[in-house]
Amino acid sequence: MADSSSEDDNVPLGQITKRPDSVVSSSSLPNKEKRRKIVNYNQFDDDDDDSAPIARPKKKKIKTEKKSNGSSSKTPDKVVSKPIKKENGIKKSSHKAAAVTKTEGAKKPLKEMDKAERIAHAMQAYLWWNASDPPKGCQWVKMEHAGVSFPEPYTPHGIKMRYDGVEVDLSPLEEEAATFFAAMDPEGMHLGNPKTAPIFIKNFFADFRAVLGKNHVIKDFKKCDFEPIREYLNQQKLIKKAITDEERKQNKDSRNEIMFKFGYSLVDDHLEKVGNYNMEPPGAFRGRGEHPKMGKLKQRVEPEQVMINLSECAPVPKCNVPGHAWGDLRHDPTVQWLCQWKENINNQVKYMQLAAQSSFKGKSDRSKYNKAAKLCGNIDKIRANYKKNLKSKSLETRQIATAMWVIDRLALRVGGEKDTDEEADTVGCCSLRVEHLKFDPNNEGSDNKEIELEFLGKDSMLFKQTIDFGSALYTENNGMGEQVYENFKLFCKKKKKGDDVFSDLTPTILNAHLKGIMEGLTAKVFRTYNASKTLQEELLKTEKSAGWSRLTAAEKVVEYNNANREVAILCNHQRSVSKAQETQLENLGGKLQTLIDQKKVLKKILKRLTEGNDKNIPTKKDEAKAIEKATKALEKAKKMKETAKTPEEKIAATEADEKAKILKKEAAELKFNQAHLWDKTPTSEQVMKRITAWSEKISKMEMNIKHKDDNKEVSLGTSKLNYMDPRISVAWCKRNEVPIEKIFSKTMRDKFNWSMAVPPDWQFNEEISKQG
C-alpha cells in the first residue's frame, strides 16, 4: 500500500488550502482516513497573506477514541464520550476528541520573530563570499542609506546649582554643561580617583567657564555646588525604574523605529546593517586611563558638520533635524564610510560605517587572516634576516633587527610619537624609553639576562612583564635572546630615563622596512600570525593528549579557553578586575562551600537511613512561604508601577520593587541552601542519587570558578575577535563535536559567518593565503 503522505503531493493546491464546511469526526472515517491528522484550519487565519500555507502539513498517526463495535482496531480500557460543541452553525470537535501523545503535548509553540529578527534572518540569505566583487579599487557600485540619526535637543529641567551657597540662574546651554558634571559619580573611576580627578575637574571647569562667558558670576570651581542637580538626576533614575511593561514596550518601539529608518543601508542591491547610526550625544569626555583631555566638553554635532557618502543615483536622505541640512555630499565608491564628521576633543574625523557582520568588514577580516597566513611561508626567511642583523655594525640596522625580534617574539605594537598634552602616554616598540626597562630587577648578578618591561600600552593597559632573555624559550633554535639583551644594554648606555631606547628608529622607518620584506606586512600582521599559530598549536597539543576522547564537551571548552588565554597573554590583552567580578567570585566560592557542606549532610542522612534510623531527618522548612511572600511583594510593586502617576508615587513604586527583589533574592538563597533536602523523609535510593548529582554539581562549579579566576585579568574576547583566525576555532569545534555556540557568541557567529563552512581538517597555513 502506498504511503498516504505521498498521495498528498498530487492533491491540487486549492483543494489543500480550501477550508472545509465542517470537521468530520474521526470515528466516521475509513481506516486510512483515521490515520490522517485532523488539520485545524483556524490556525492559518492571519491578516498577512504571506503566512498562508502552501502545502498541507505532513500527516502523523494519532490515537483515536472509538466505541467498541467489533472492528479490528484496539479499544481503550476506558472510553470517555463527550458531545461535540456547536458554535456559529459549524460543528467543532473537542480538543480532547483525539488523545495526543505526551511528546506532542509537551511541544512548545514556536516563538514568533519580530520585525528586526525577520530582517536579520532574511539578510543571512546573502553570502558575500559567493558573490562577485565590485570593480578593482571600488568598495561598492551602488549605495543608499538614510544618513545619521541625531539625538533629541536638550530639555531644561530648571534645577539650579549653587555658587558660594547662592542659587545661580543658568541658560539652557549652561545648565546642560552643569548637568554633564553632576551626572558623574563622585566615587567613580574619574572623580573618585585621586590621579584622574584633578585632570577631569581642571578640563571641565575650563570648558564650563568658556560656556558661561567672562562676565558670569561663577569664577572658582571650589565654590560650585552641583548637588541639587545630582539629587534631581538620582531621583529621575528612581522614576525611570518604575517604568511599566507597556512603557518599556513603547520605548523599545521608538528605538526600533529609529533603527528601521537609519540602521540599514542598501549596498549593491542587498541590505546591510549599519553600525553606529546614532550620532554621539554631547557630554563630558571621559577617555581611557589618565587621558590628558578627560573632562572636556564634547560639543553637539550639527548636521552642517556631516558629510554624506552615497552613489550618485541614490536619493539624498532627509536630515531629521528641522531647519538644518547636511554639510556636504560625496560620491566616492573607493571608501567604505557612509558619513563623516570631525569631533572637537581630539579634532579627529569620525565615521558612520557598516556593522561588524557586514560584507565590508567580512572581506577585510578574511583578507587580514589570509595575509597573516602568508607569513607561514615567509617567516623562516624573515627571522633569519633579522637574526643576522642583530650583530650589524650599523646602529640603525641593529635597532631595526632588535625591533623586529621584539614585535615577532613579544608581540609588541610598533608605537608612535605622541603629544602627551593631547593624548595619553601610551607606548609601543619604537617609543620605548629607558625608564620603561629595568635590567636585573631582582639583583641576581651579572649573569642574569632579565629585563622588566613596564609601560602603558594601547588603551592605557599596563604592560608589565619580566623577560628572561637567557631562558630556553628565547635561546633555543638560534632564538638569539641573549644577543637581544646585549643590544638593549647597548641602546640604553649613557642615556637618561626619558630618552628613547631606539634613538635611530621611527615608526615610519620600521613600517617601510616591514613592507619591503613582504607586501602588506605590518606589526599587526605579525600579531595576527603569532596569535593564530599559537592557538592552532595549543589546540593540536591538547587533542594529542591522553584521554582527550573521553572528555565531555564542557571539559573540551575549558581546554580551548586555556589555549585562548595563552594567546591573550602573548598579545597582552588584559582587563581590569572590577568590583563586580570580585564579588561574583566570592559568591561562587560561597556557593561551592555550601554544596560541599550539603554533600556531607547527605552522607550523614544516608548513613542513618542504612542503619534504620529515619527519625529527625532534616527536611525543607519555610521555603514555600518565602517564595510566596516574595511573589506577592513583586506583584504589589508591579501594580504600584502601573497605577503610579506622580513622581512621588513612581519613586515609592521603585522602592517597593527593590524591597521585593531583596525578598526574592533571600527566597532564592533559602531555596539553594535547602536544595539537598526533601519535603519529607527520603529513601536511601533517593539520597544516593542526590549525592551523585551533588558530586557533579561540585565538579562543574569548581571548573567554573577556576575558569573565571584564571581569566579574570585576561581578555579572551579581544584576541578571538581581532587576532585568532576564526576558521581554526570552527574546524576545532567540528573535529571535536563541540557546538560553535560554546566558543563564539551570537555577535561573533554573525561577524565570522564566512568561516563556518571550513572542513574539520582545515589548517592555518600558507595555502589559504592564495584564497585572496
Image (cartoon, rainbow, N blue to C red):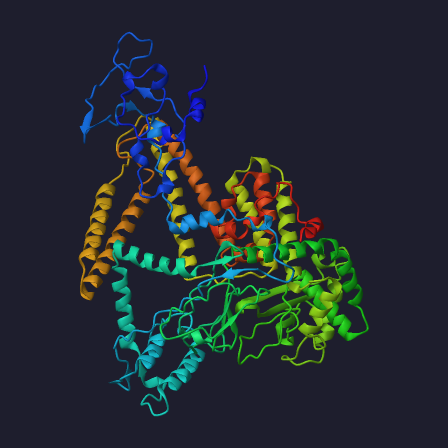
Percent across and percent down for residue 76 are: 28, 15
Task: Name the foreground residue: 618 vs 740.
Answer: 740
Can residue 379 be seen in the rendering of this structure?
yes
Which image quarter is the N terminus in?
top left
Percent across and percent down for residue 116 are: 40, 52
Task: Name the foreground residue: 11 vs 632.
Answer: 11
Q: How many marks?
A: 0
Can residue 65 be seen in the rendering of this structure?
no
Q: Looking at the image, is 353 positioned above or below residue 224?
A: above
Q: Looking at the image, is 647 positioned above or below residue 676?
A: below
Task: Name the foreground residue: 119 vs 170.
Answer: 119
Q: Looking at the image, is 644 positioned above or below residue 731?
A: below
Asked whether, in this view, residue 749 is left or right of residue 502, the answer is: left
Q: Quadrant of residue 602?
A: top left
Of all residues, the one furthest to the bottom in this rendering is: 215
Q: Quadrant of residue 101?
A: top left
* Residue at the spot 30% in from the left edge and 30% down from the top edge: 19
Q: Quadrant of residue 102?
A: top left
Percent across and percent down for residue 466 are: 63, 64
* Residue at the spot 30% in from the left edge and 38% down from the top edge: 45
